[in-house]
Image: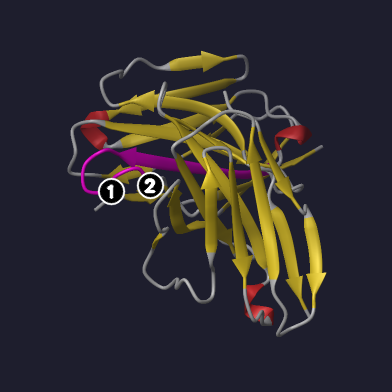
Amino acid sequence: SAVISQKPSRDICQRGTSLTIQCQVDSQVTMMFWYRQQPGQSLTLIATANQGSEATYESGFVIDKFPISRPNLTFSTLTVSNMSPEDSSIYLCSVRQASNYGYTFGSGTRLTVV
Amino acid sequence: AQKVTQAQTEISVVEKEDVTLDCVYETRDTTYYLFWYKQPPSGELVFLIRRNSFDEQNEISGRYSWNFQKSTSSFNFTITASQVVDSAVYFCALNSLGDAGNMLTFGGGTRLMVKP
């Protein structure tokens, strides 16, 4: 299965700033997903990022707040913009492998906004 | 629409006890995939199992076993002779290939605490 390298693993940021999270996959994948996990909660899909097209955002998430780039089939970034303490969460990227319908996750970025 | 319900938010057991984590799902599709993931305190998601809707065979992997029953829309997970290292949050998830497309829908998670 695919291996995902996600960076940074954690960060503490000042409110009003932005943080860009990177995910690098060791193989080409069509679909990449970004999830948010608020403290003590389950995972919520932010958006689906396909190469060569605009990301598709789920209800409650907007591009201005969570811009996503997907320049090629092995890389994607998620930016958390104009952060507030409410953005403190774990952010995870994920890929779906067409060969076996499996989903692999990055190790997560634990973000704390102060 | 697809939905996953894990009614047990927290379970506490003593080491060596058996424990079952419940998962009930909803989907209108006939083709779908069910998953279980483990999330230890470090935060990463560890894949445990994937089951497609056409395979109702139960599965056993070491101390772990899964009971898939389409009649009750359940995909329960049992840990036999639990160990302290099993302490984690466990998520059940669903991907149905119809309306939901490619997204993975997660249940709320069950926090398992295994005490020595």
Q: How many marks?
A: 2
Range of residues picked out in magenta: B88-102
Q: Chain of mark 2?
A: B
Going 51% across and 15% down the picture, which residue do you hit? B60
Is residue B93 covered in magenta?
Answer: yes
Q: Which residue is mark 1?
A: B100
Instruction: Please state the horizontal and vertical placement of residue A66, each as a whole percent of the image.
Output: 54, 69
Q: Which residue is mark 2?
A: B103
Mark 2 lies on a secondary structure that is: loop
Instruction: Please state the horizontal and vertical placement of residue B95, each as a whole percent of the image.
Output: 35, 40
Name the amino acid, label 1: Ala
Front position in the image: B25 or A56: A56
Residue A10 is drawn in which quadrant? bottom right
Mark 1 lies on a secondary structure that is: loop
Going 47% across and 71% down the picture, which residue do you hit? A63
Residue A101 is drawn in which quadrant? top left
